[in-house]
Image (cartoon, rainbow, N blue to C red):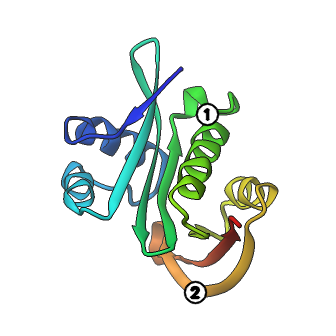
């Protein structure tokens, strides 16, 4: 596995990966817009030259927000999400960023427990935030972790 920065040339692959994982996955333009923002950064993992996972985050002052973390379903349960999150946390601590935030859909139990295992705590909820099929709505859980 190789971790490298997520760059503009990765946006079409990033969009395909995101659309596989999420009901309303982001487009190539969404990723390009994010990566054009000087406060947004990303990392990707490639395995045998295959783009398998990514993490995208925003840094503002002493805080960071994970915008998305996604692993290709074929490569899940192989430690890639953990590797990306650990790499990000190490990087943020090195930059003196003291807190990290993210949100996860309440119905995404696997992701919620993953973040909880890394010390993220529930900050608050946004009722009916995420859209699902059939106009159903799901609550967003806002999580926070102090890094130091």
Please identify the quarter of the rendering in which residue 106 is found.
Answer: bottom right
Q: For this view, does 1 lie left or right of residue 79?
A: left
Please identify the quarter of the rendering in which residue 135 is found.
Answer: bottom left
The x, y position of residue 66, in whole percent, is 50, 62
Q: Which residue is mark 2?
A: 126
> In the displayed structure, would residue 72 be above or below residue 144?
above
The x, y position of residue 74, in whole percent, is 56, 26
Marks 1 and 2, Cα distance to the nearest angstrom? 28 Å
Query: For the point 50% across and 68% down, which residue is it?
Result: 64
Q: Name the foreground residue: 61 vs 68.
A: 61
In terms of secondary structure, where does tag 1 sit? helix
Label 2 crowding class (10 Å Cα cut-off): few <14, some 14-19, many 20+?
some
Please identify the quarter of the rendering in which residue 24 is found.
Answer: bottom left
> In the displayed structure, would residue 2 be above or below residue 89?
above
Query: For the point 68% across and 27% down, which residue is it?
Result: 78
The x, y position of residue 19, in whole percent, is 38, 48
Query: For the point 60% across and 68% down, which residue is it?
Result: 105
Q: Residue furthest top?
A: 48
Q: Name the foreground residue: 144 vs 104.
A: 144
> In the displayed structure, would residue 108 be above or below residue 128?
above
Q: Which residue is mark 1?
A: 80
**Mark 1 or mark 2, which has the lower sequence index?**
1
Q: For this view, does 107 lie left or right of residue 56?
A: right
In terms of secondary structure, where does tag 2 sit? strand
């Amino acid at each position: 596995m190789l971790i490298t920065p997520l760059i503009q040339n990765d946006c079409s692959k990033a969009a395909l990966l995101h659309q596989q994982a999420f009901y309303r996955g982001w487009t190539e333009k969404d990723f390009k817009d994010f990566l054009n923002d000087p406060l947004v950064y990303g990392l990707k993992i490639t395995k045998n030259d295959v783009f398998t996972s990514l993490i995208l985050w925003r840094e503002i002052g002493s805080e960071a927000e994970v915008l998305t973390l996604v692993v290709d379903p074929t490569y899940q349960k192989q430690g890639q999400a953990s590797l990306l999150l650990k790499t990000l946390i190490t990087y943020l601590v090195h930059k003196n960023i003291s807190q990290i935030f993210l949100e996860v859909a309440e119905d995404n139990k696997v992701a919620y427990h993953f973040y909880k295992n890394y010390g993220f705590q529930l900050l608050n909820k946004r009722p009916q935030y995420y859209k699902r099929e059939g106009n159903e709505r799901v609550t967003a859980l806002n999580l926070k972790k102090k890094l130091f």
